[in-house]
Image: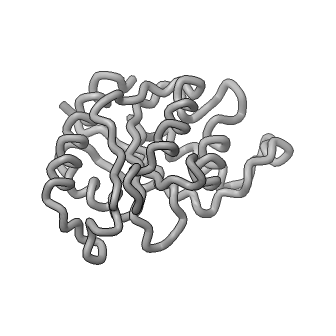
């Protein structure tokens, strides 16, 4: 089985975000199983169809090309106001256009949501799940990942919670199988 390339889309723009720390942890846990790389969304202009001409903004093209080159996508996101952050929604919009040429099409995916609160980003996770069928992305159904109390799980960038590490390892292993089964 060849190592599959996974685009990680981190929903938070904050430099020291918990979503970014989780992404880095999962990259380490996936070593030898999945080739994971964070695809940056911070420099994407707000999607405006008027800008999406024969020569779209270079950031649109670079982002779309990165997603197209991946065998699967892992979304890691915080919850903002019971939904996904605006930057993540914008990245989804950019990748979904132009109509009929979406970069997301047929990319197997999974979602990890997190929050310092107890619900672990449940609202963001489910709002994102509502978008995925329209994007034609087969979403891994289980295990679901709602990481609550995330602010207590790291010392700097180092995950200190062994139980969470074990869960994330199971998640990565399951996702590797999901991508193998569903990638083109």
Q: Is residue 8 at least partly visible in the picture?
A: no
How many marks the image carries: the answer is: 0
- Residue 67, given in percent of the width and then of the height, sits at 50, 42
> Does 130 sit above or below residue 59?
above
Q: For this rendering, which residue is in front, 123 or 184?
A: 123
Closer to the camera, 57 or 78?
Answer: 78
**What colour scheme was applied to this rendering of the protein?**
one colour
Which quarter of the rendered picture does the N terminus lie within? top left
Q: Residue furthest bottom?
A: 156
Q: Residue furthest front?
A: 118
Determine the image quadrant of residue 161.
bottom left
Residue at screen point 57% across, 28% down: 135
Residue 166, horizontal then vertical, whole percent: 15, 50
Quadrant of the snapshot with the C terminus: top left
Q: Is residue 52 left or right of residue 10?
A: right
Residue 97 appears in view: yes
Query: In the shown orientation, is residue 161 left or right of residue 18?
Result: left
Is 183 left or right of 2, judged from the image as shown? right
Location of residue 16 by image quarter: bottom left
At which x and y percent is residue 105? Answer: 53, 27
Above or below, 181 relative to 72:
above
Q: Residue 109 location, x and y as percent?
A: 41, 34
- Residue at 19% across / 47% down in the picture? 167
Q: Residue visible at 23% across and 30% down?
A: 177
Question: Which residue is at 29% across, 22% downward?
Answer: 181
């Amino acid at each position: 089985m060849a190592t599959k390339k996974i685009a990680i889309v981190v929903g938070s723009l904050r430099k020291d975000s918990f979503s970014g720390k989780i992404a880095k942890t999962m990259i380490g846990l996936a070593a030898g199983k999945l080739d994971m790389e964070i695809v940056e969304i911070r420099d994407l202009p707000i999607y405006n169809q008027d800008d999406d001409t024969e020569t779209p903004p270079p950031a649109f093209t670079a982002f779309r090309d990165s997603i197209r080159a991946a065998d699967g996508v892992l979304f890691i996101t915080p919850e903002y106001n019971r939904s996904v952050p605006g930057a993540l929604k914008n990245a989804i919009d950019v990748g979904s256009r132009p109509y009929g040429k979406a970069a997301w099409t047929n990319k197997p995916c999974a979602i990890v949501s997190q929050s310092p609160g107890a619900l672990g980003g449940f609202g963001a996770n489910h709002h994102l799940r509502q978008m995925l069928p329209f994007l034609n992305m087969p979403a891994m159904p289980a295990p679901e990942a709602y990481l609550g109390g995330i602010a207590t799980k790291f010392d700097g960038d180092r995950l200190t919670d062994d139980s969470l590490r074990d869960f994330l390892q199971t998640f990565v292993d399951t996702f590797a199988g999901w991508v193998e089964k569903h990638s083109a």
